[in-house]
Image (spheres, helix red, strand yellow):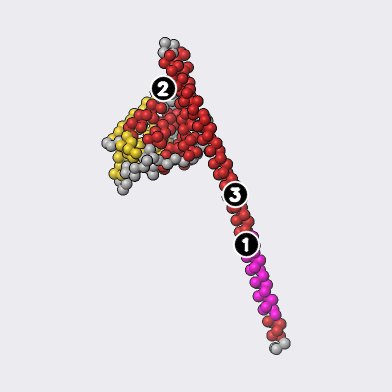
Amino acid sequence: MNEQLPVELLNDAFNGFRDASRKLEEQYALLEDRIDELSQELAEKNRALERTRRLAAMGEMAARVAHEIRNPLGSMAIFATILERELGAEPEKQRLANHISTGIKSLDNLLSNMLLFASSPEAKLKPVDVRKVLEEALLLARGHEKEDVSVKAEFCGQTSIMADPVLLRQLFLNLIINAIDAMDRGGVLKVRTKVIDDRQRYMEIKFADTGRGIGKEHIDRVFDPFFSTKDRGTGLGLAIVSTVVNAHGGFIDVDSVKGEGTAFTIGLPMMREYRI
């Protein structure tokens, strides 16, 4: 019996060593897998960081180019307006000059969107009359009009709010142009403002068109930069709308039915600190 004891102890020790070795091998394999996962995550993050750096560089370059283009564009706009007036007695030539003015306005709006997207703007708040800003946006939208497309505005109650008028005008302009583009066969764009007294008092501004609508497969991506369902769209218009709303600490909802139209509902806080 005494002679067999050391053999049993050795067997037990060997089995214990074998079990421990197996567990170590399993843990080592798991560790190797985890290292591979971390290496892949690090590589993906490095690629994402490199893309971010490139996008930042492209954004900076785009902003500089936009500024350089805007100066001569302003002169072109002035000359085109003078030309339109001078050609009052020649309707056909005046129509051509009007096309030039429309193209300049489109380019100016594109440059404005590019600059806003590149700068991630902060809202400089001051008392603003939403009605006045909307009228300015409608004036800037001239040239994008279509036959049988009309705009109806309804202002319920107070129209004053603390906001950035420049950013707000660009927001309205983008939504107006977007709505007009969506109404290929004519229609109506209804704009309505009203003050909502909920948990937080805010102004609701709703843009509802009777255009082609947005498919369910695209509805969650409409505010993504560079996403567009239009052949010649830049995908910046609605991205800027979302950026401006966020800069004001507000919210935006979209509701759309394919073939019937789209409604964008914006909520902007009424009481905000005055900022210069």
Q: Which secondary structure dominates the residues rendered in magenta? A: helix
**Tag 1: amino acid:** Leu
Q: In which quarter of the view is residue 271 placed?
A: top left
In the picture, the quarter occupied by the N terminus is: bottom right
Q: Can residue 204 be seen in this view?
A: no
Task: Say which residue label 2 marks.
Answer: 147
Frontmost residue, 128 versus 29: 128
Q: Is residue 22 highlighted in magenta? A: yes
Q: Is residue 183 highlighted in magenta? A: no
Q: Can residue 113 be seen in this view?
A: yes
Q: What element carries label 3?
A: helix
* Real-space CA distance between mark 3 and mark 1, rounded to the nearest whole angstrom: 22 Å
Task: Say which residue label 3 marks.
Answer: 46
Task: Determine the residue positioned at 38% across, 38% down.
Answer: 164
x and y, in percent, of residue 76 in the image: 48, 22
Q: Residues within 10 Å of mark 3 (few under 14, many from 20)?
A: few
In the rendered structure, the answer to whether residue 58 lies left or right of residue 167 reads right
Establish if 56 lies above or below 36: above
Query: Which range is magenta?
Result: 10-32
Task: Determine the residue positioned at 54% across, 41% down.
Answer: 56
Which of pointers 3 and 2 lies earlier in the amino acid sequence?
3
Q: What element carries label 2?
A: loop
Q: Are marks 3 and 2 in contact (CB under 8 Å)?
A: no
x and y, in percent, of residue 146 in the image: 42, 24
Task: Determine the residue positioned at 43% across, 14% down.
Answer: 86
x and y, in percent, of residue 224 in the image: 49, 40
Which of pointers 1 and 2 lies earlier in the amino acid sequence?
1
* Real-space CA distance between mark 1 and mark 2, rounded to the nearest whole angstrom: 68 Å
Task: Say which residue label 1 marks.
Answer: 31
Choose mark 3 or mark 2, whichever is in front: 3
Choose mark 3 or mark 1, whichever is in front: 3
Frontmost residue, 93 versus 272: 272
